[in-house]
Amino acid sequence: MTQKKRGKRQKPKISLTHEELSVDRIWDFDGQIERADFNGGFLIGSEEERITFDDVVFKNVRFTGSELRNAEFVDVIFDTCDLSNAQFKNAHFQRCEFRNSKLTGANFENATFKHILFEACDGKYSNFSFTGMQEVSYNECNLTDADFFECKFKEVQFITCKIENINFSETNLRGIDLSDSTYERIEVSLEQIKGCIVSREQAIGFARVLGLNVQEY
């Protein structure tokens, strides 16, 4: 199999020294948290004002059900975190990595992603609708039943992901390589799949979506 071309994704710029803080203190800061490590704990509550995380590492932190709408994350790593059902609507992410994290039901609607890595994450039922994505890689992620409705993709990769029943409706898939991801059924807009890269077996599935009667020998 031909190896996929890697993009020019920029990695997070993480300082060598960080202050260790408790997630209980996040709401005490005046909208800006820099050069900090959060290890463990459960973030509860929401923030109405915009909050910015810059040069921050979250490890084993639970965000379950928390609300960080309009938040900004720059040079941030989420390592083995639980973001299930967390709200990140309208948030901005730049040079961030999500590693071995749970994103089940997380809401990233209308967010912005630039230079982002999702690696070995469980993103079942996650919502990425209306997001703008530039230099984003999903590597070995479970994106079953995830929603990518009307997204704007630029240099986005799906590498050996599970994408069963994923929703790509109204999203232009030109240049998107799905050939080594696994699915039996996905939602797409027929006028938006031109230029999508698929395997031979997947092409047969697309042909059936188009209403063609595929004769197999």
Image (tube, grey):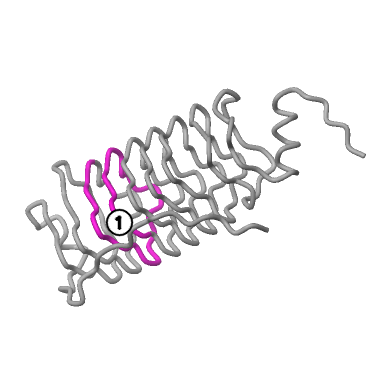
Q: Which residue ends up furthest to the left in the rendered image?
A: 30
Q: Relative to the observer, which residue lies in front, 39 or 140?
A: 140
Q: Amino acid at mark 1?
A: Arg
Q: How many marks?
A: 1
Q: Which residue ends up furthest to the right in the rendered image?
A: 217
Q: Which residue ends up furthest to the bottom in the rendered image?
A: 17
Q: Please identify the quadrant where the C terminus is shown.
A: top right
Question: Quarter-wise, where is residue 191 in the image?
Answer: top right
Asked if 34 appears above or below 31 in the picture, the reply is below
User: Where does the magenta region start and end?
Assistant: 70-97
Asked if 23 appears above or below 187 in the picture, the reply is below
Q: Position of residue 1 (x, y in %)?
A: 68, 58
| Residue at 49% in and 49% down | 157
Quickly name the residue at label 1: 95
| Residue at 9% in and 57% down | 29
Specify whether 75 is left or right of 64: left
| 82 in magenta | yes
Mark 1 surroundings within 10 Å by alpha-carbon count, few (fewer than 14), some (14 through 19), many (20 or more): many
Q: Position of residue 118 (x, y in %)?
A: 43, 56
